[in-house]
């Protein structure tokens, strides 16, 4: 590393839903793990967030995959894949009424804060 300003990749498990680490973007190489009881609880946790740019779901159930694609309140849901690629032709932006990305508010597209790129990863 060229300087001491780099932070090592860190995974934090058992993060409380209401903690700052769960509610704010660290803008660092930090992955937070929040555990839910079932699909309903995971959807509640994910949709309770003020952000909504992108969600990622890992599952072996086609039914669960479609449910999360339909019910996650984010601009884009990726299923069983990473987000380490970028297709410039694919529309991208956050869910309306959220504090991140392009949102659709009141029937009109509105530019919101694009500084947050946090993703929510749900593994079923």
Image (spheres, rainbow, N blue to C red):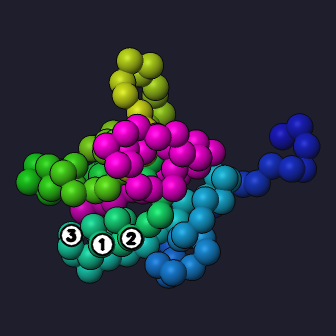
- From this viewpoint, which residue is outermost toward the left? 63
**Residue 59 seen:** no
For the residue pair 44 and 59, the one nearer the viewer reads as 44
> Residue 46: horizontal and vertical position, in percent?
36, 65
Relative to 54, 124 lies left or right: left
Q: Are marks 1 and 2 in contact (CB under 8 Å)?
A: yes
Magenta residue check for 91: no
Q: CA distance from mark 1 to mark 3?
A: 9 Å
Compared with residue 73, is residue 83 higher up or lower down, i.e. above or below?
above
Disc 2 secondary structure class: loop
Please indicate, yes or no, whether residue 39 appears anywhere in the rendered image.
yes
State the separation of the CA atoms marked 2 and 3. Answer: 14 Å
Q: How many marks?
A: 3
Dot 3 corresponds to which residue?
Answer: 39
Q: Position of residue 15 (x, y in %)?
A: 51, 77
The label number, if any, that marks residue 118 in the structure image: none
Classify mark 1: residues with Cα within 10 Å, few (<14), some (14-19) or many (20+). some
Q: Which residue is mark 1?
A: 44
Residue found at x 44% / y 66%: 49
Q: Please report the bounds of the magenta region as a residue range.
A: 97-124
Query: Which of the numbered marks, if any, corresponds to residue 48?
Result: 2
Q: Are marks 2 and 3 in contact (CB under 8 Å)?
A: no
State the image coordinates of residue 71 (x, y, percent, origin top left).
Answer: 21, 57
Residue 105 included in the magenta stretch of the image: yes
Q: Residue at x 54, y 69 (%)?
A: 23
Q: Classify mark 1: helix, strand or loop.
A: helix
Residue shown at 58%/42% (left/top)? 114
């Amino acid at each position: 590393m060229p300087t001491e300003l780099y932070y090592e990749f860190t995974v934090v498990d058992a993060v409380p839903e209401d903690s700052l680490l769960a509610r704010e973007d660290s803008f660092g190489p930090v992955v937070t793990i929040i555990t839910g009881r079932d699909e309903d609880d995971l959807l509640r946790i994910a949709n309770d967030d003020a952000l909504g740019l992108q969600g990622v779901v890992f599952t072996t159930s086609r039914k669960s995959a479609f449910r999360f694609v339909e019910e996650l309140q984010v601009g884009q849901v990726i299923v069983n894949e990473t987000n380490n690629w970028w297709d410039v032709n694919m529309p991208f932006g956050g869910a309306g009424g959220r504090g991140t990305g392009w949102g659709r508010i009141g029937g009109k597209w509105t530019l919101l804060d694009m500084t947050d790129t946090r993703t929510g990863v749900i593994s079923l």
